[in-house]
Image (cartoon, rainbow, N blue to C red):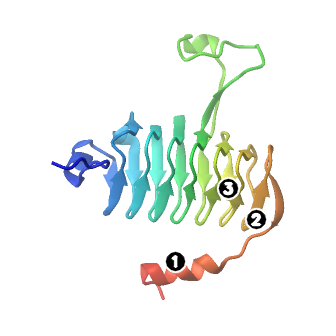
Amino acid sequence: MQYNPYYSNRELREMGFKSLGRHVLISRTCCIYTPDKISIGDNVIIDDFTIMNGEINIGSYIHIGSNNELYAGDSSITMEDFSGTSSRCTFYASSDDYSGAALHSPVAPKAFRREFQAPIVEEKFCVIGTGGIVLPGVRMGQGCSFGAMCLINKSTEPWGVYVGAPARRVRERKQDMVEMARKLKGDV
């Protein structure tokens, strides 16, 4: 018998996802802690060693590279259609207070902690390069691209190319892919 690095359709259905589309490939090495809170659209690939925890909404035509971490906490993470990530990207929809005014550990009782939680949205056609980090409350505008090692700590305007830590807009991004997506989905 040949080893299949991806879960079968039957195995995925048995995991109990909130919703699960067609043509979904998820590596067997992924850690999926809350499948009942995760929605996945059509034509999605999730590569090795990705961690998903909390309310996560993944649209269609999405690739999530290896070693990604999506931590929604008590908030949510949404990746809209045709968005994606390269390897080693991390989404934090929840963060502890590191000022010293509170304890910062999940083992400390909530009364001693101060957390900031806010939804993250990666709008259609966005892509994040290797090592990108997204912090709570960020809405990445439609069509943005983020270079390797970007720290995305503020919401962004659509169709920009962003680089750096913190991420800053350096130029406009082409929008040719919108027409390609329409053709792919048969919307023309």
Q: Residue furthest front?
A: 1
Q: Secondary structure at mark 1?
A: helix
Which numbered circle lies on residue 50? none
Rendered residue at 68%/47% (across/down): 138
How far apart marks 3 and 2 lie (CA) works out to: 10 Å
Q: Which residue is mark 3?
A: 140
Decide if residue 151 is on the left or right side of residue 43.
Answer: right
Query: Residue 85 at x, y = what percent?
Result: 57, 53
| Neighbourhood count class around disc 2 (C-alpha, 10 Å): few under 14, some 14–19, many 20 upward | many
The residue lying at 62 percent from left, 61 percent from top is 126
Q: Give whichever of 49, 119 is nearer the camera.
A: 49
Going 80% across and 43% down the picture, which residue do you hit? 165
Which residue is identified by label 2? Answer: 160
Q: Amino acid at mark 1?
A: Ala
Residue 10 on image: x %, y %: 19, 51
Residue labelled with disc 1 = 181
Q: Give whichever of discs 3 and 1 has the lower sequence position.
A: 3
Q: Is residue 127 above or below residue 111?
A: below
Mark 1 or mark 2, earlier in chain: 2
Q: Residue at x 69, y 62 (%)?
A: 144
Q: Quadrant of residue 36?
A: top left
Circle 3 crowding by C-alpha within 10 Å: few under 14, some 14–19, many from 20: many
Q: Is residue 29 visible?
A: yes
Disc on the earlier residue, 3 or 2: 3
Separation of disc 3 and disc 1 at Cα? Answer: 19 Å
Q: Residues within 10 Å of mark 1 (few under 14, many from 20)?
A: some
- Identified by mark 2, the residue type is Gly
The answer to whether any part of residue 75 appears in the image is: no
1 and 123: which is toward the camera:
1
Residue 182, image x, y percentages? 51, 81
Q: Nearer the viewer's eye, disc 3 or disc 1? A: 1
Identify which amino acid the numbered label 3 is placed on.
Met
